Image (cartoon, rainbow, N blue to C red):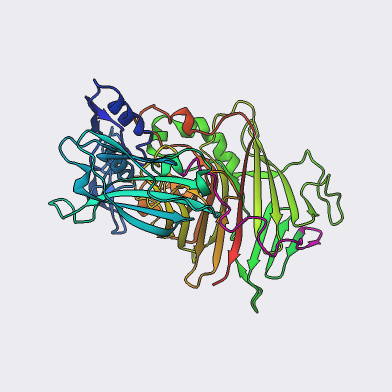
Amino acid sequence: IMCEYGHAMGNSFGAVHKYLELAYREPLFQGGFIWDFADQVIQRTDRYGRGYFGYGGDTGDAPNDLDFSGNGVWFVDRGATPKTQELKYLYQPIEVVISPSGFTVNNRHLFTGAGDYDCLASLSRDGRKLAERRLEIEVGPGESRAYPPAFAIPKGPGEYAVDISFRLRSATAWAEAGYEVAFGQAVCRAAWDTGTGQTGAGAGAGRAEAGRAGAGRAEAGRAEAPELVEGIHNFGVRGRHFMALFSRIHGGLVSYRFGFTPDGGHELLRGVPRPNFWHAPTSNEVGWQMPLRDGQWLLASRYARIRNDLPGGGGAGADPAAANPSAACLADRVEVRYGLELGGAPPSQCDMVYSVFADGRIELELTVRPGAGLGDMPEFGALLTASADLRRLRWYGDGPAETYVDRRRGARLGIYEADVADQLTAYLRPQEAGNHTGVRWAEVTDGRGNGLRFDCAGQAGGMEFSALPWTPFEIENAAHPVELPPIQQTVLRPALMRRGVGGDDSWGAEPHPEYRLPAGRELVFRFGFKGLRG
């Protein structure tokens, strides 16, 4: 019996499923105790009268262990952290394995039969429920039984999810009737063309091919290219309902207006989209000195310039095959290219290719070539900023709580909604948080429905996505949530992948290799975005 495992300090509790798999596989391993139940903190008041939770050093104590006591799977007020979503799934007493041939129920109870619960099965397409039915399941304690498929998967296009849920038939001292005790989910394309079944979004959503969810290039109205207007300092691209302006000087898209109005349309961006390789270090990453090892990726995210080893754009009429940046009008789109040199030593390079279509959708492809000898990136994606009015987040992906590549088994693939202001989980010390894996599409809108819709550009398994009120750099600079600046913007970070949060311990153990981006080789990430009109 392990007296401690899964040290849950800050944004942590990654790859804990490996401990549970071992417990069920190895007869001599009986399990263990997660460290810890709840955060241990001291209520404090800052000089402006604002309350906050203090940790080591906040009372002038020295030496101290900083936020080492913030290691609970519950907050100090006993509110659930996102880690409980994973914990509940890993500890559930009934395992459901769904495959094309049916599903298997493994009852891990010692005394309770699966028939003591209500069992509901549902079928969804692209996140919307199509059907639901009640199943009669009888599996004794410690037994397993196979059942035929709960639904026939339609042959029509779409991404289908089958959910099987076990719920309390009547109220208990610890939960109301209808409370879900266990679930399984499998995700597939039409007619189970993935060939395998998966249980839980962490196994299914990450492997099933992601549909374009209405964002593919075959969309109506995209047959002809928009108009390209070349100027001395800028490239302009315009269509019937949008205008985009690309700067030869500032290295990217400087304006994106969508939905023409008397004032020229809604400006939807607040800055040039940048490649991003950094996030605010988690407590675990601080424990293994990630900021020291990976600091070059912070510089690469903050500072970039148009490469000077390529021919400059010079002005209108430059040869698009030779210039940097360059723009070209192709059959169905305008393509704008930038070659960037990234800060750090040795410097890395990143190519950013914008494909602008006639309906206003922009697809962005980032190709990064790391400098020799650099380690793996904390993340690989893009950072875009928009008005703080775009605070309504809606996404089709893993949820409802935040997820990471090594902590997503307790999530379900579905459509979820949230307020951007609530997306940064209130860990004791501000750090990377609010990520969502397996995102097929995401929308951020204002109160009238104006905003942006992002899609994964056909990337298998979706992308990762976060929408937060602050940049990673602002989050990293705050020692407590009350020190975060007033909300001025919405920060959008679509990503190929973010490093897993880890959790074996918080004083040297790094995330497992399979939950890290590969180091030392070229990586490519594509995503798309388009304006929305209310």
Q: Answer whether residue 209 is magenta in the image.
A: yes
Residue 206 position within the rendered picture, expressed as x and y whole percent measured from the top left: 48, 42
Residue 290 % position (x, y) = 46, 32
Q: Is residue 271 left or right of residue 284?
A: right
Residue at (30% x, 58% y) in the render: 50
- Number of labels in the image equals 0
Q: On the picture, is 277 further left or further right than 362?
A: left
State the residue at coordinates (47%, 28%).
Answer: 513
**In the figure, 214 relative to 66: above or below?**
below
Which SS type dominates the magenta stretch?
loop
109 left or right of 212 in image: left
Residue 472 appears in view: no
Foreground: 333 or 161? 161
Q: What is the x, y in percent for residue 187?
A: 46, 46
Q: What residue sits 54% from the left and 69% below the top?
A: 450
Instruction: Identify which residue, 117 or 56, lies in the foreground.
Output: 117
Residue 283, quarter of the rendered image: top left
Residue pictured at 17% horizontal, 35% vertical: 110
Q: Determine if residue 166 is in view.
A: yes
Residue 359 pos. (x, y %): 68, 64
In this rendering, would 392 be left or right of 38?
right
| Residue 495 figure quarter | top right
Q: Which residues are magenta?
A: 205-234
Magenta stretch holds residue 178: no
Residue at the farthest left position: 173
Quadrant containing the C terminus is bottom right
